[in-house]
Image (tube, rainbow, N blue to C red):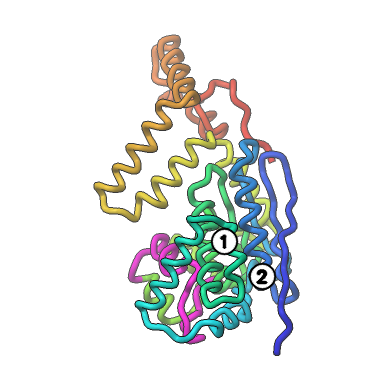
């Protein structure tokens, strides 16, 4: 029997930006230890108003995250009798209910048939909390990522990958399974239904250049520049007001997959929350005062617009940009 892999997160606080090195053991796998630490980290940064961005990168020289620890998946599956779609759906719904009821209930289910579903639900909820958060999450892919490694990257807001002989994708079908960490949902939303379907059915990963061309990555740079480029993006996007970032992310990630009518309701709700907030009111009043003073709309004055893009808000020099 193969030895159990262990892993951990090495967290480096850099003021408004947190850099996280994923240490997945010699094979750089994502197992339950990393999943638990990731949940704790996401909870912490989401609650901390002074943190604006998190950058994840791999500790392995050529891998971001290899894939999920196979023992974690196999042992969980072995604890549960084979089930049909109806039985699997019942397990998933029960796990969702446990997660919503109380996190304290989960440990009592360890070593029971429900435990694999509970762990999967917890991981999905961690990724969803990233999607709802006012923190910008960036995957700095210093190397390859397959399976859950790719799914973790898709769950981030931005992705920078190293150029070279590296790859990213969903090969699960080749092991007789399918993506379970969100691959069928997030990759589809990134590159479209048909391209996602073909890629996941074939099991062949993308090169960095292919993923960039499809829109699954935001940039591809030399390997020794990946972290620096991710930090640039963290400083740039992290300079936006955190509550606005959270509202926009919820509208895009959650509302964007609903019907148009329901999605518009999500956007309308988030807009009203922000428009009536102290920060939203302050910036709009400041904008109107500047319009009166200059006789021109500030966003049509090149210096004001360029500065606002760089600083993250139309604040006329009164708001400091996020530093690394």
Residue lying farthest to the left in this orientation: 261
Residue lying farthest to the bottom in this orientation: 1
Q: Residues within 10 Å of mark 2 (few under 14, many from 20)?
A: many
**Who is closer to the viewer here, 232 or 277?**
277
Q: Is residue 5 left or right of residue 133?
A: right
Question: Which is more foreground, mark 2 or mark 1?
Answer: 1
Q: How many marks?
A: 2
Could you tell me residue 128's position as x and y percent?
Answer: 49, 55
Q: Is residue 78 magenta?
A: no
Task: Identify the element where label 2 is drawn.
Answer: strand
Task: Identify the element where label 1 is drawn.
Answer: helix
**Who is closer to the viewer here, 11 or 121?**
121
Q: Is residue 262 left or right of residue 182?
A: left
**Magenta segment range?**
168-194
Badge number at residue 105 = 1
Q: Quadrant of the C terminus?
A: top right
Residue position marked by numbered label 2 in the rendering: 63
Q: Is residue 209 visible?
A: no
Q: Residues within 10 Å of mark 1 (few under 14, many from 20)?
A: few
Residue at left 55%, top 57%? 126
Residue at left 67%, top 37%? 323
Could you tell me residue 318's position as x and y percent?
Answer: 59, 21
């Amino acid at each position: 029997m193969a030895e159990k892999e262990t892993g951990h997160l090495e967290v480096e606080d850099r003021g408004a930006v947190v850099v996280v090195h994923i240490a997945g053991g010699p094979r750089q796998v994502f197992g339950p230890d990393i999943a638990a630490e990731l949940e704790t980290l996401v909870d912490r940064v989401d609650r901390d108003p002074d943190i604006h961005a998190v950058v994840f990168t791999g500790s392995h020289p050529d891998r971001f995250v290899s894939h999920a620890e196979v023992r974690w998946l196999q042992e969980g599956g072995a604890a549960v009798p084979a089930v049909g779609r109806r039985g699997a759906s019942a397990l998933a719904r029960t796990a969702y209910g446990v997660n919503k009821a109380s996190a304290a209930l989960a440990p009592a289910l360890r070593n029971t048939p429900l435990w694999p579903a509970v762990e999967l639900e917890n991981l999905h909820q961690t990724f969803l909390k990233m999607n709802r958060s006012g923190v910008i999450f960036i995957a700095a892919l210093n190397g390859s990522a397959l399976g859950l490694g790719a799914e973790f990257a898709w769950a981030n807001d931005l992705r920078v990958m190293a150029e070279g002989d590296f790859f990213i994708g969903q090969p699960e079908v080749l092991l007789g399974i399918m993506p379970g960490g969100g691959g069928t949902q997030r990759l589809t939303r990134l590159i479209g239904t048909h391209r996602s379907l073909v890629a996941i059915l074939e099991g062949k990963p993308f090169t960095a250049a292919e993923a960039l061309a499809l829109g699954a990555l935001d940039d591809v740079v030399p390997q020794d520049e990946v972290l620096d480029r991710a930090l640039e993006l963290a400083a740039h996007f992290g300079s936006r007001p955190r509550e606005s970032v959270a509202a926009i992310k919820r509208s895009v990630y959650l509302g964007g997959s609903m019907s148009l009518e329901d999605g518009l309701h999500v956007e309308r709700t988030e807009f009203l929350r922000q428009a009536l907030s102290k920060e939203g009111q302050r910036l709009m009043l400041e904008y109107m005062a500047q319009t009166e003073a200059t006789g021109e709309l500030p966003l049509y004055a090149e210096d004001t617009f360029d500065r606002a893009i760089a600083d993250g808000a139309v604040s006329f020099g009164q708001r400091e940009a996020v530093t690394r």
